Image (cartoon, grey):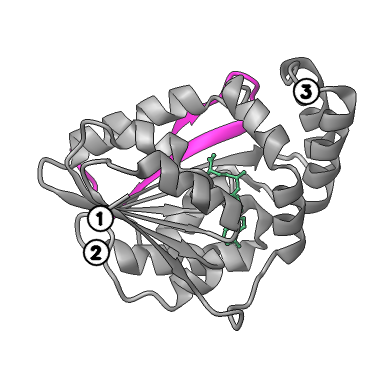
Amino acid sequence: MVNVHIHQFGAQNAVVDAEAIRVFQAQWTIYQKLVDNDHLSHRAVGRILKSVLAEHFAEPFAFLDIACGDASLAKTALAGTRVRHYQGIDLAKPALELAARNLADQPYDVDLDHRDFVAAIAGRSEHADAVWCGLSLHHLATDDKLRMFRGIRDAAGGRGVFLIYEPFLEDGEDHDQFLDRTWRAISVWWTSLSPAELDQIWQHIKSCDRPETADTWLSLGREAGFSTATQIFEDPSGLYRMFRYEVHGRP
Ligand SMILES: C[S@@+](CC[C@H](N)C(=O)[O-])C[C@H]1O[C@@H](n2cnc3c(N)ncnc32)[C@H](O)[C@@H]1O
C-alpha cells in the first residue's frame, strides 16, 4: 500500500451525529448487503459520477470523498479518469481500513483521514477540485448542511464540481409522510435483508434521517456560492436523488 496513508485525528474533534455513527458501525454488514445487491443504486451512481469527472476534468484533479466508507463507489468512478490525488474522510475506522485495502495500488496518491467530516470541512485549507458525498449529509440539521456546503464551496476553488446523493422530501411532504413512503419502498425493494436486518436499518432511518426537498438541496448549493445546481438522477425506488453543483456553469 505504498500510495495509501491513514491519518488519525485527535479525540478533540466534535462529532455532530455520534449516535448515527455508532448505529452505522453496528450496521456495516447490513449496509454492505444493500450495496452488494445494488438496492441503493450504487452502480448507476458510480457510472454517473465517473462520466461527470471524465467530462469535467481534462487535466489531473484532486478528489475529496466525504464519508467515504470503504471507498468502493469512488474506486469504480475514478478508474480511467485523470485523478491524481484521493482524500477520504470517515469516522468509522473499520471502513477506512477497508478503503485502504480497496485503494491500494491505484495509480493515484491516497490520504485517508479518520475524523468527523463537519470538523474536517470547517477547518479545511487544502484545495479539492472534485468533491463527492454519498448518503451522509442527511443526518445533519439544515444549518449544519449549509455550513458544510459553504466549506466545500471554499475548498472547491474556481473549477470545482461537487456531487451528492441523498434522500429527499417530496414537495409538500412532512417527515411522517417521508417515513411512510420510505417504509413502503424499502419493504418492497430491500428484499435481500432478513426481517431483523430490515428492522435495524428502519430504526436508524427513523431516528437519524433529516432529508430536504429537492428545492432545498439545490438552494443550499446556490446559497453557499455555487453558480449552478442541478438534479441529475433519481434512483428507481424513488428514495434517493443525485445533485450536481458547479462553481462556474458550463454551456
Ligand atoms: C451510508 S454510509 C455511505 C458510505 C459511502 N459514501 C457510500 O455511498 O457507500 C455513511 C458513511 O458516513 C460515515 N459518517 C457518517 N457521519 C460522519 C461524520 N460526521 N464524519 C465522518 N464520517 C461520517 C459513516 O461512518 C459511513 O461510513
Determine the CA span between mark 1 and mark 2: 7 Å
Query: Which label number is shown at residue 241?
Result: none
Which residue extends farthest bottom? 12
Q: Residues within 10 Å of mark 3 (few under 14, many from 20)?
A: some
Marks 3,2: beta carbons within 8 A: no
Residue 250 belongs to magenta span = yes
The residue under label 2 is: 157
Side (left or right) of 194 relative to 28? right
Residue 230 seen in this snapshot:
no
What separation in Å lies between label 1 and label 3 (alpha carbons)? 37 Å
* Residue drawn 19% across the image and 33% down it: 55
Q: Which residue is mark 3?
A: 193
Q: Is residue 235 above or below residue 96?
A: above
Q: Position of residue 214 (x, y in %)?
A: 56, 42
214 or 240: nearer the viewer: 240
Amino acid at dot 3: Leu
Q: Earlier in the sequence, mark 1 or mark 2?
A: 1
* Mark-to-mark CA distance, 3 and 2: 42 Å
Q: Is residue 228 visible?
A: yes
Q: Are marks 1 and 2 in contact (CB under 8 Å)?
A: yes
Tell which tag, 1 or 2, sits nearer the viewer: 1
In the rendered structure, which amino acid carries the disc numbered 1?
Asp
Q: Which residues are magenta?
A: 229-251
Q: Which residue is mark 1?
A: 129
Q: Nearer the viewer, residue 205 or 33?
A: 33
Determine if the C-beta at disc 2 is less than 8 A from ligand 1: no
Name the kind of residue labelled 2 in the image: Gly
Name the residue at 69% across, 57% down. Answer: 21
Q: Residue at the left extreme? A: 59
